[in-house]
Amino acid sequence: MTAQTTREFGSGPLHRLTQAVYGVLGPTACFLVVCLPFALAVVMAPGAVTIALAGILIGPAWTALLYATRVHLADRDRGPVTSFWRGYALNWRQTLLVWVPYWVLLIAAGADVISPSASLALRWVVGIVAALSTIWFSAVLLIISRYAFRTRDVLRLAGYALVAAPRSTVTNVALLVLAGATIYLESEFVLGLLAGLFALFAVIGAKGMFELLDARFTTQGRQDGAR
């Protein structure tokens, strides 16, 4: 009776709900800790250089958050906080290789857009290019969080996935629109608090992309090339 009671307690709806909430809040807290220097830079020294330098931390933290979210969805018994730090350790180098140039270009594009001397046409062109590159880059980080592919292969596969996995692309577009609306209506800090939910929907939306890449670009499905 005791063993049965224990099993029922550990598999009840309240336990599952608690696991689900912790699976979002735990990695989100880790994400916020890693991104704390960026938040301090925005508040205390809001210059282009300090924000650009502190923002370098965001990329690896987001990839680790995606990794922890995916692992938690696949196996609720694995600790989401532990998974976050494992994902960070696995992916930070490769993430920085692609994130740093992207982030620098994004900061430069933002400076051009807000410049008083910028024409309306230039603002539209820069805005469209930035939006398209961000959609593509969202797929890049999702792939890095899931696979141990070479960086140049990740970049190519992300472009391929934009067309071949439309559900993931649509999900990324929707999340980017929501992220922009959150920043516009509230602030970057509110977006940071919601990072776990954004990662959850990004990973769920990327299911089709992961299945496609598993089937076509790994030799043994989920065995080779997957983290």
Image (cartoon, rainbow, N blue to C red):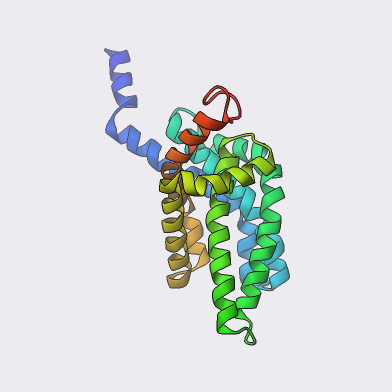
- The tally of labels here is 0
Residue found 52% across the figure and 56% down from its top? 135
Q: Quadrant of residue 182?
A: bottom left
Q: Is 93 displayed left or right of 184 in the figure?
A: right
Residue 115 vs 8, above or below: the answer is: below
**Who's the residue at 38% across and 39% down the image?**
20
Residue 224, position in %: x, y? 60, 25
- Above or below — where is 116 with respect to 227? below
**Residue 105 location in percent, x, y?**
68, 64
Going 39% across and 36% down the picture, which residue do you hit? 19
Please identify the quarter of the rendering in which residue 76 is found.
top left
The N terminus - image quarter: top left
Residue 86, horizontal then vertical, whole percent = 61, 35
Residues 74 and 12: in front is: 74
120 and 110: which is toward the camera: 120
Q: In x, y percent, where is residue 75?
A: 45, 29
